[in-house]
Amino acid sequence: MMQFKTKILKNTSIVFTFFLASLTTLNAQNSEQTAKIDGVAVVVGKNIVLDSDIDKFKQEVELRSEGKVKISDCEMLEELMQQKLLAHHAIIDSVTISQSEIDSRVQRSIAFFTNEYGSEEKVVAAYGFNDIEDLKKELGNVQKENLLIEKEQQKITEDIDVTPEEIRVYFKGLQDKKELPEIPAEVQLEQIVLKAEPTKEEEERVLNKLKEIKKEVENGASFKLKAIINSDDPSVAQNGGNMGIITKETGFVKEFKEAAFSLDEGQISEPFKSPFGYHIVYLSKIRGNGREVSHILIQPEISDEKLKETKEEIEKIVADIKEGKITFEEAAKKYSEDEETKNSGGLLVNPYTQETTFELTRMPPDLFARISELKKGDLSDVFYDETREGEKMYKVIFLKDKTENHTADLVKDYVRMQQFALAKKKEEEVTKWTKQKIEETYIKLGNDYKKCTFKKDWKKESK
């Protein structure tokens, strides 16, 4: 999304701000009381912005900028109209969004929020949703619109580029106006991951246990009771294994959906494996395109002996790196079991910027604590980690590079200045596109906002 103030570019992420505020706004709109008292601020095409949207987004901007950015209702509304205009024309231009793209973003978002709040339950409570599936559904709605907006912007600016001279002129302009940005302290990180896998005997035990439960339920036992007694799903105490109604668009893992949609009413699946462990699924009802299902999840146990072996193995790798027998990158490619990073020598990619740098002060607290005191070229201690899916592993992190907070320099920060100059040029192109599309699009402002002074002609007569 476009930045609507230069200061915001320095202090907060507008994409993420709109994403967070959208969650709160969407959930608030589900409230009957809110709907009764809420007013319509503007209609852009078929998209509506409510008064409450403006308030929520303003609060999130101020929160994410730590109070450094203040924005008026009119400024906030103009930015929201810009996003709705892009989303509206993305539909007209037949911009395509795949369900896998949405699901991938939802999963990354859940992981981020879980890191921030400590657990999925706390995330659900913080944003006022009924359960994690309710949250995932709304995340899917938000991410779908975000993707439409992003892809429409990409379509508008796909041929835009900047020359070295344009970058120099852009930098000089900021320098002359004493508006050079502050570049925050950043790090580049590499990792080696070794997973502690269950033994074949343990996996066989789990499979046999699930087969036994399946047989008992088919002979009349209660699936719900079996789930309460046996399932490792943390929500089983509240739902007895019931996952509600799912569709092919629901953000469940592929293996789960494939099993659920292969069943007839009253059937129980054979045991199957997913990233979370081993399951059996019971289909209680087919409801149109949806399936009302319950499941039992059993995660294979990993012995203390296996954990110890895994830790000792990674410690030997670290010793070889320290003795110069192998570089960290070579060791990552040879030994690491993290498929996303091993081929790049363990290099971590920031999931929210898609860059290989992380702002030091915006890192998850647990990761910050492990690397904040490291110098360039240092290794962290070997440490234990566990994913929300239950995978157990040991990791070591290498601090590949570290830059301190500083005022932008054309040579040192050439890539960053290139990004800024390109973003400005793209913003100018989107502004030209916006002026044209405003004339072609139905726009109706609420009476309370007709007095606003906008940068663009949003007050034109609706067509």
Image (cartoon, helix red, strand yellow):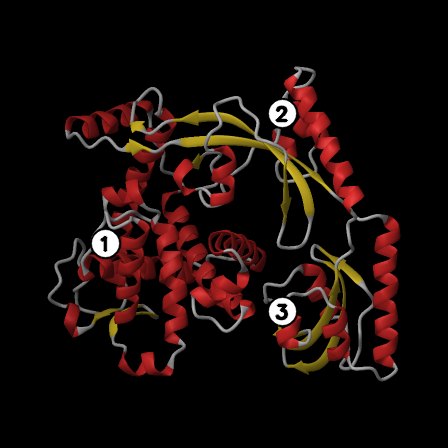
Q: Is residue 389 above or below residue 282?
A: above
SS state under label 1:
helix
Mark with earlier residue (2, 3): 3
Give residue 37's position: percent from left, percent from top.
27, 81
Closer to the camera, 181 or 305?
305
Q: CA distance from mark 2 to mark 3?
A: 40 Å
Tell me the quarter of the picture where residue 337 sits.
top right
Which dot, 2 or 1, sits closer to the camera?
2
Q: Name the residue at 32% across, 68% down.
A: 45
Q: Residue furthest top?
A: 324
Tell me the quarter of the picture where residue 212 sits.
bottom right
Residue tagged 3: 235
Q: Is residue 365 above or below residue 257?
A: above
Q: Name the residue at 28% across, 39% down.
A: 424
Look at label 1 and name its amino acid. Answer: Lys
Relative to 101, 24 lies left or right: left
Residue tagged 1: 435
Look at label 3 and name its amino acid. Answer: Ser
Look at label 2 and name its amino acid. Answer: Glu
Residue tagged 2: 329
